[in-house]
Image (tube, rainbow, N blue to C red):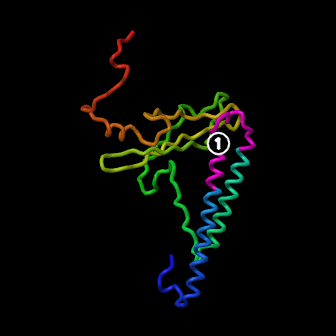
Amino acid sequence: MLDAADLPDDIAALKAMLIAAQAREVRKDDRIERLEKLVAAFKQAAFGRKSEKADPDQFDLALEDLETAIAAIHAEDQADSPLGKPQPKPRAVNRGSLPAHLPRVEEIIEPESLICACGGGLHCIGEDVSERLDVIPVQFRVIVTRRPKYACRSCTDGVAQAAAPARLIHAGLPTERPSRMCWSPNMPITCRFTDRPRS
């Protein structure tokens, strides 16, 4: 957006800027209308009547048209920006990784035996690392569970590794402690099967 100080004092220049802005607005309205038509056509192809019988290549064509139109709009928007300011980067999304500032408590779970069936010793070839969010009242920490993998150098009998510990929520980040904090004995438990007689 332009400040009043950035605007020229000449009326003819102001008129030219106004005409250019109106032309940009008309072009953007046309692009929006084109994109809405493309989206409607894609929705019809994907979800409309007899979409199961549609050729999958038609979806690719609709997506290519949509991507081309979006790229053209971004290019025109970059060219139309009055001061050529760079667009801000989108925020990075954090999915599944826990913050580094939380203290870590490492648990190393070894297999029961480090001796191979052939009699040779197993050596570590890697490990599986999982992180879960744990809470001590008023303090969060991350429990890192390491399960080294061992293999025999003498034979190719396989890899030995301790079994993963059981979790309250399969592949979930929280441990049992946060779950216990959320549940209290006064909380009513509802289950649709509790009122039925057991057979």
Q: Left of 2 or right of it: where is 102?
A: left
Q: Quadrant of the C terminus?
A: top left
Q: Residue at x 60, y 77 (%)?
A: 19
Along the line of sight, which residue is nearer the eye, 188 or 114? 188
Image location (x, y in percent) of residue 102: 41, 54
Along the line of sight, which residue is nearer the eye, 50 or 153? 50
Image location (x, y in percent) of residue 151: 65, 37
Q: Residue at x 27, y 35 (%)?
A: 184
Which quadrant of the structure image shows residue 55?
top right
Q: Is residue 92 above or below residue 84?
A: above
**Which SS class for mark 1?**
helix
Image location (x, y in percent) of residue 90: 54, 61
| Residue type highlighted by circle 1 | Gln
Q: Left of 10 or right of it: where is 181?
A: left
Image location (x, y in percent) of residue 84: 60, 76
Q: Residue at x 67, y 33 (%)?
A: 50
Q: Which residue carries the number 1 mark?
A: 44
Q: Left of 107 or right of it: where is 81?
A: right
Q: Is residue 148 above or below residue 90?
A: above
Which quadrant of the structure image shows residue 133?
top left
Q: Is residue 76 above or below residue 63?
A: below
Q: Residue furthest left?
A: 186
> Mainly helix, strand or loop, the magenta region?
helix
Q: Residue at x 52, y 55 (%)?
A: 93
Q: Which residues are magenta?
A: 35-58
- Magenta residue check for 51: yes
